[in-house]
Amino acid sequence: MHVSISSWGIALILPVVICGCAADKNAKTIQSGDYAITVMTAPSPLEVGYDAEVTARVSKDKQTMADCRVRYRQFMPDHEMSADNTWYDMAGQGKGVYTARGGEFSMGGDWKLEMQINCADEALSVMLPYHLEWPE
């Protein structure tokens, strides 16, 4: 049996393979000026009792931004915790993708991820809301 993949088939599959997370229905994209930041988490959706791996894809004017400093913190706006000011530096994976593993999501409720991005002497900060359900 001979299987042939056309260049169209490769063109359709390749973006999903490169990102690895493109099909994440829980991915959140936020626009800030010319920048677009898409954030994905594992587990997805986030779960109480787990450390999350956070992946961010950063682009400006639809062009990926590879040489940025990206970091994030996770916190609950309504519950002050000692870890609220812990920042996690995200390692560049190429093609504007950055990853880091953060702390444990210790309880259900409303959480925020604050992302700080510094690219080519431009700095921006964005907030992404997340709601975690208590486990049953």
Image (cartoon, grey):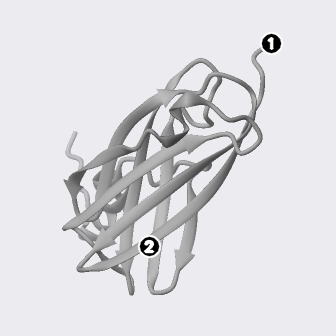
Residue located 44% across and 73% down the image: 124
| CB contact under 8 Å: marks 1 and 2 | no
Determine which residue is flagged by label 1. 136
Q: Could you say which is closer to the camera, residue 108 or residue 20?
A: 108
Residue located 22% across and 53% down the image: 92
Above or below residue 83? Residue 63 is: below
**Residue 60: x and y, percent?**
37, 81
Q: CA distance from mark 1 to mark 2?
A: 38 Å
Q: Secondary structure at mark 2?
A: strand
Q: Amino acid at mark 1?
A: Glu
Residue located 75% across and 27% down the image: 108
**Residue 80: x and y, percent?**
67, 35
For the image, the number of numbered tags is: 2
Image quadrant where residue 13 sits:
bottom left
Q: Residue furthest top?
A: 136
Determine which residue is flagged by label 2. 124
